C-alpha cells in the first residue's frame, strides 16, 4: 500500500483545496523539486477517479508512473512522499492563516517593529484596530488579539524615551491579557464541572485563593464572556437555586450580539446540560425549557458547524423534543437536519428517528415500516431498532413475534464481538423484564412490586420510563376490576 499518511491528508482536501495545493507546489518559493509536483499529480489523478483508483495506488505503481524504466528505489520514493506530506501540511497552515486576516495583521505589526518604519507601523496598527472593530463578538481570541496589539505597541514604546501613551498601552495590555486568561480559565473550569457531572474523578481544576472575589470586580463584569461563564459556574455549583440559571438565560439573551457564534453555540449547549441535569433529577418540566433552548438554537441557525451536525446533538434534540410532546416539530427537524449528519450514518439516523417519532405517537405500523430500512451493520442503530421493535410488538399485543425477537436478540448479543459485556448484561436484563411484562397479572401484587424494584435498579441507557409506565398500566387494570 502507498503512504497512508499522505493519502489520508489529501483525501481530506476538497477539489478546490487540491487545485490550490497544486498552485502552491508550482511556486518555487515553497517547492523547487519537480518530482514532488509529479508525485502529487499521480495521487491527485487517482483521487479524482475515486476510491477504487486510490486503492490501486501501491509503491511499484506510483514509482512506474514517476520513473518508467528505472529500477524501483524505496528510499527515494519514501523521501519524496515525506516531502510532499510536509508541503501539504505547510499548505494547510498557509490556508488557515489566509483565512484569519487579524492574525496576519498582528504578525505584520510585530515584524515591522524590527524596522524603523514609522509610516508602515502606523498603518499596521490602524489595520489591526480596524479588524478588531469589525469583530462580531468578544471571544477569548478577541481579548488575546487586543493584548497582542497593545503589547506590540508597548514593546516599541519601551525602546524610546518619553513616548506618549506608554503607560496607557502597558495597562491596556495587562487588562486584555487578564481577560483572555480569566475567560480561558473559566472555560476549563466549566469543562471540569460538566465532566464531574457524569464521571467520578479525584482530579480538579484548582483556583488560587481569592480568585472568585477578584473575578467579581466591576471591570470584569463588563466583559460578557467572563460574566456569563461566572453565572454558568454558579448554576452548576449551586444547582438547587434555580435563580442562577434564569439569570444566566437572561444574560445570554442580552449578550448574544457580543459573543462570537462559536461561544454562543457552546453556551447554549451548556445551558442544555443544566436542563438535562434537572430532568435526570425527575423534574420533567425541564423538558419544555430544554426544548425552548433547542428551538432558539434552530431559529438562530447555531446548529450547523462547518457543514455538519454532530450525531449526538441530533439524537439529544430528538429525545428532548419528543419528551416535550413536540411530535410534528420533531419530525420536521429530522427531515430538515438529517442531511447534515455524517454520510455513513445519515440514512440510518433518518429512518430510526422517524420510527421513534411514530412510536411516541402510537403509530406502530409506521414504526415497523421505518425500522425495515435501518441497516443493522451499525451496532448502535441495531440495538436501538431491536429495542424499539420489541416495545412495538408489546404495545400491539403481538406476543409470538415478541418471543421470536427476544430469542434472536439474545443470539445477536451473544455473537456480537463489539458490544461490551456490561452493555450485553443490561440488554439481556431488559429482555427479561419485557418477557416478565407479558406474563405478570394485575392480581400478582408481590410480582408487580418485585418487577418495579428490578426496573428501578436498571440504568437510564435502557427504556426505564417505558417499563415503569407499562407496570403502572398493569396495576391500573387491577384497580379497575
Image (spheres, rainbow, N blue to C red):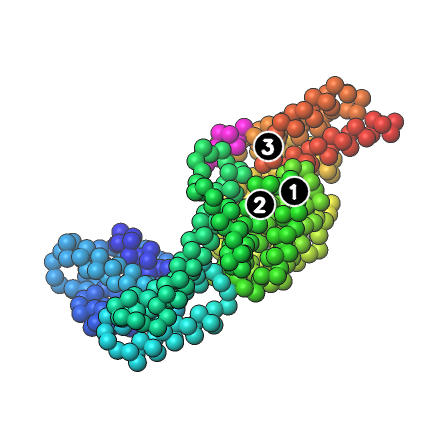
Q: Quadrant of residue 70?
A: bottom left
- Give the foreground label among 1 and 3: 1
- Residue 116 seen by the camera: yes
The x and y percentages for residue 9 are 33, 58
- Earlier residue among tags 1 and 3: 1
In front of the other: 262 or 214: 214
**Residue highlighted by disc 1:** 241
What is the CA distance from the residue labelled 2 to the residue labelled 1? 9 Å
Residue 376's disc is none
As rendered, which of 263 and 227 lies closer to the eye? 227
Could you tell whether 347 is left or right of 54 in the image?
right
Which of disc 3 and disc 2 is earlier in sequence? 2
**Label 1: which secondary element:** loop
Residue beneath disc 3? 459
Answer left or right for 20 relative to 301: left
**Is residue 366 shown to the viewer in this render?**
no
Magenta: main secondary structure: helix
The residue at 50%/65% (across/down) is 137
Q: Are marks 2 and 3 in contact (CB under 8 Å)?
A: no
Q: Which residues are magenta?
A: 418-425
Q: In the figure, 454 relative to 183: above or below?
A: above
Q: Nearer the viewer, mark 2 or mark 3?
A: 2
Which residue sits at x=34%, y=75%? 124
Q: Is residue 291 left or right of residue 417?
A: right
Could you say where residue 178 lies in the image, as x and y percent from the top left? 42, 55
Mark 2, residue position? 234
Labelled pair 1, 3 in contact (Cβ < 8 Å): no
Q: Residue at x 30, y 69 (%)?
A: 157
Residue 47 percent location from the top left of the image: 34, 63
The one nearer the camera, 12 or 441, is: 12
Amino acid at each position: 500500500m502507498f503512504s497512508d499518511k499522505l493519502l489520508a491528508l489529501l483525501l481530506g482536501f476538497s477539489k478546490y483545496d487540491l487545485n490550490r495545493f497544486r498552485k502552491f507546489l508550482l511556486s518555487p518559493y515553497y517547492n523547487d523539486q519537480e518530482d514532488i509536483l509529479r508525485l502529487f499529480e499521480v495521487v491527485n489523478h487517482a483521487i479524482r477517479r475515486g476510491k477504487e483508483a486510490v486503492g490501486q495506488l501501491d509503491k511499484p505503481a506510483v514509482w512506474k508512473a514517476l520513473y518508467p524504466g528505472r529500477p524501483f528505489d524505496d528510499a527515494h520514493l519514501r523521501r519524496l512522499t515525506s516531502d510532499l506530506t510536509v508541503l501539504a501540511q505547510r499548505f494547510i497552515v498557509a490556508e488557515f492563516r489566509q483565512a484569519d486576516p487579524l492574525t496576519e495583521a498582528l504578525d505584520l505589526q510585530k515584524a515591522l517593529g524590527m524596522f524603523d518604519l514609522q509610516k508602515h507601523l502606523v498603518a499596521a496598527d490602524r489595520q489591526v484596530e480596524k479588524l478588531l472593530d469589525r469583530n462580531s463578538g468578544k471571544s477569548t481570541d478577541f481579548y488575546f488579539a487586543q493584548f497582542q496589539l497593545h503589547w506590540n505597541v508597548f514593546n516599541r514604546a519601551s525602546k524610546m524615551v518619553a513616548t506618549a501613551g506608554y503607560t496607557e498601552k502597558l495597562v491596556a495590555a495587562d487588562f486584555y491579557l487578564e481577560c483572555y486568561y480569566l475567560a480561558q480559565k473559566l472555560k476549563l473550569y466549566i469543562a471540569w464541572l460538566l465532566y464531574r457531572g457524569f464521571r467520578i474523578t479525584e482530579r480538579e481544576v484548582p483556583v488560587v485563593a481569592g480568585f472568585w472575589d477578584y473575578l467579581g470586580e466591576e471591570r470584569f463584569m463588563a466583559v460578557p464572556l467572563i460574566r456569563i461563564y461566572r453565572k454558568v459556574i454558579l448554576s452548576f455549583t449551586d444547582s438547587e437555586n434555580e435563580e442562577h440559571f434564569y439569570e444566566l438565560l437572561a444574560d445570554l439573551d442580552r449578550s448574544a450580539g457580543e459573543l462570537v457564534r462559536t461561544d454562543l453555540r457552546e453556551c447554549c449547549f451548556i445551558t442544555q446540560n443544566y436542563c438535562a441535569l434537572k430532568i435526570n433529577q425527575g423534574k420533567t418540566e425541564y423538558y419544555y425549557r430544554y426544548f425552548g433552548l433547542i428551538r432558539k438554537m434552530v431559529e438562530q441557525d447555531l446548529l450547523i458547524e462547518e457543514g455538519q451536525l454532530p450525531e449526538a446533538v441530533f439524537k439529544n434534540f430528538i429525545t428532548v423534543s419528543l419528551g416535550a410532546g413536540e411530535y410534528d416539530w420533531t419530525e420536521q427537524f429530522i427531515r430538515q437536519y438529517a442531511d447534515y449528519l455524517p454520510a455513513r450514518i445519515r440514512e440510518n439516523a433518518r429512518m430510526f428517528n422517524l420510527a421513534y417519532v411514530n412510536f411516541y405517537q402510537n403509530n406502530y405500523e409506521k414504526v415497523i415500516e421505518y425500522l425495515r430500512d435501518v441497516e443493522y451493520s451499525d451496532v448502535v442503530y441495531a440495538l436501538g431498532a431491536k429495542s424499539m421493535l420489541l416495545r412495538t410488538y408489546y404495545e400491539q399485543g403481538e406476543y409470538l413475534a415478541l418471543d421470536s425477537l427476544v430469542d434472536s436478540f439474545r443470539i445477536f448479543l451473544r455473537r456480537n464481538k463489539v458490544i461490551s459485556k456490561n452493555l450485553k448484561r443490561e440488554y439481556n436484563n431488559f429482555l427479561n423484564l419485557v418477557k416478565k411484562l407479558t406474563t405478570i397479572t394485575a392480581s400478582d401484587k408481590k410480582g408487580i412490586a418485585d418487577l418495579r424494584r428490578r426496573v428501578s435498579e436498571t440504568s437510564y441507557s435502557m427504556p426505564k420510563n417505558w417499563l415503569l409506565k407499562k407496570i403502572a398500566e398493569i396495576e391500573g387494570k387491577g384497580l379497575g376490576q
